[in-house]
Amino acid sequence: MGLMDHRKTWQFELKAAPDRCLTAFDVALNGRSAFSMRKARWDVRRTTSGAGLPAAVGTYAGRDGAAALLMTFAGRSIAEDDQAAIGSEISFEVRAHDRSTGRTKCAMWLSRRGVRMVDFTAQAGFLRASMKDVASKLAELDSSVTVTKI
């Protein structure tokens, strides 16, 4: 995973129904154990893209579980970085679905981000890891998923 992957559009092609892809997005963002240091609260809402295809937006609402407890002891700078990240959004949309082959093309990108110190994305590492979790969940649907980052 590259250092700036959170600033790219991730494109996926896999054999799965669009609804299953959107469910994988939701589960990837919200499916961590309360004891995970990467547990977060995400508000995932389903919508439609400009082309009328299924889409979803996950809005970061802060750390949760053990991660939230750790934030209380982590220091002011880390807490401020997390606070700046609240409201960041990861968008996910279906771009095409071929019913004859069952193949779906999707895209995911960081559509809104909190900024710290000029132009640094707040919680960039955490957001990248969350995007990677989505890619992993999609790979569980189809192990031959292709991922392109542009």
Image: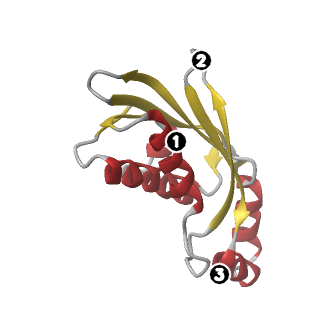
* Amino acid type for the residue under numbered disc 3: Ala
State the residue at coordinates (55%, 69%). 32
Q: Amino acid at mark 2?
A: Gly
> Crowdedness of circle 2 by 10 Å Cα count: few (<14), some, many (20+)?
few
Q: Amino acid at mark 1?
A: Leu
Q: Nearer the viewer, mark 3 or mark 1?
A: 1
Q: How far from the left and from the top, in percent, is residue 112?
A: 67, 38
Q: Which residue is mark 2?
A: 52
Q: Is residue 9 visible?
A: no
137 with respect to 50 (left or right): left
x, y percent for residue 120:
62, 48
> Left or right: where does residue 107 sit relative to residue 32?
left
Q: On the rendered structure, is 86 left or right of 127?
A: right
Q: Quadrant of residue 50?
A: top right
Question: Which type of secondary structure does the marked residue at label 1 adopt?
Answer: helix
Work out whether mark 3 precedes mark 1 in sequence or the reverse, and give the earlier one: 1
Residue 22's label in the rendered image is 1
Mark 3 Cα within 10 Å, few/some/many (few <14, many 20+)?
some
Q: Nearer the viewer, residue 96 or 116?
A: 96
- Secondary structure of the residue carrying tag 3 is helix
The residue at 31%/29% (across/down) is: 103
- Out of 80 and 131, give the one closest to the viewer: 131
Q: Label 3: which residue?
A: 66
The answer to whether 138 is drawn above or below residue 65 in the figure is above
Residue drawn at x 49%, y 52% as measured from the top left: 128
Up-down: is 126 above or below 99? Answer: below
Q: Nearer the viewer, residue 56 or 73?
A: 56
Asked whether the beta carbons under mark 2 and mark 1 sit within 8 Å of each other, the answer is: no
Q: Secondary structure at mark 2?
A: loop
Which badge, 2 or 1, comes first in the chain's sequence?
A: 1
Label whose residue precedes the other's in the sequence (2 or 3): 2
- Alpha carbon separation for disc pair 2 and 1: 15 Å
